[in-house]
Amino acid sequence: MFPNNFYEKMKVSVSNIDRLVPEEQRALLFRFFLVFARFEYALKRAGFANSSGSKVSANWDAFASKYNAAFDPTNSPELKQAYAYFKEHPPRKQIMKAGVLDWSEPNVLGQGPVLIWLLGSVRIVRNNLFHGGKFPVAPIEEPARNPLLLYHALAIIDACLPLDMTVNEYFAAVEG
């Protein structure tokens, strides 16, 4: 499909990009992107969607609102650990402050629904990663924390799949 020398012809140095993410963390990064994207797809296909004209986006909050009462953050050891980690170390959004990139105050759990807060935090992790704010290793305050955010975000998404069988079926479906 691609010529053998495709990467050599790229304008961006792949070796520089490769240095951003240690080889041992690439599988986690790849899995997070795939699981996140597939979960968003499944949400939209199952009817948890917002639309404006021809644009469509996953409605994570509608899903979280519907299943918040059924969601138990202590349901499994992995989920309990993920919930505790996000409570203690909530992700922060990348923001612009006085013309300089900065980080917002943490998105702490308040009195609102736990699942809405958790899935909002998962989306912050994804946005920071996807938009270049954080990589597993980068010049940031706590680089070791980023793989933990990805790992725990995956545990949260995994715990959400059994809540809705239609979402679960679309997530697992091989064909699009």
Image (cartoon, rainbow, N blue to C red):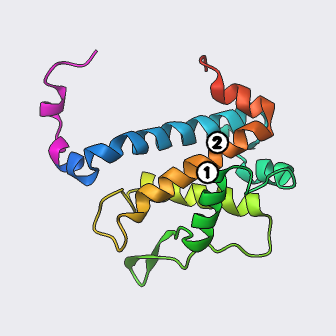
Q: Earlier in the sequence, mark 1 or mark 2?
A: 1
Residue 45 visible in the snapshot: yes
Circle 2 SS class: helix
Identify which residue, 171 or 95, lies in the foreground. Answer: 171
- Report which quarter residue 109 is drawn in: bottom right
User: Callout 1: few (<14), some (14-19), or many (20+) C-alpha neighbours within 10 Å?
Assistant: some
Magenta span of residues: 1-15
Question: Magenta stretch: dominant SS?
Answer: loop
- Report which quarter residue 132 is drawn in: bottom left
Task: Say whether residue 32 is magenta.
Answer: no
Amino acid type at image mark 1: Glu
User: Callout 2: few (<14), some (14-19), or many (20+) C-alpha neighbours within 10 Å?
Assistant: some
- Report which quarter residue 136 is drawn in: bottom left
Please give the residue where the numbered disc 1 appears in the rendered image: 78
Task: Say whether residue 7 is magenta.
Answer: yes
Residue positioned 64% across, 52% down in the render:
77
What percent of the width, then of the height, locates residue 60?
A: 71, 50
Residue positioned 50% across, 51% down in the render:
151
Residue mark closest to the camera, 1 vs 2: 1
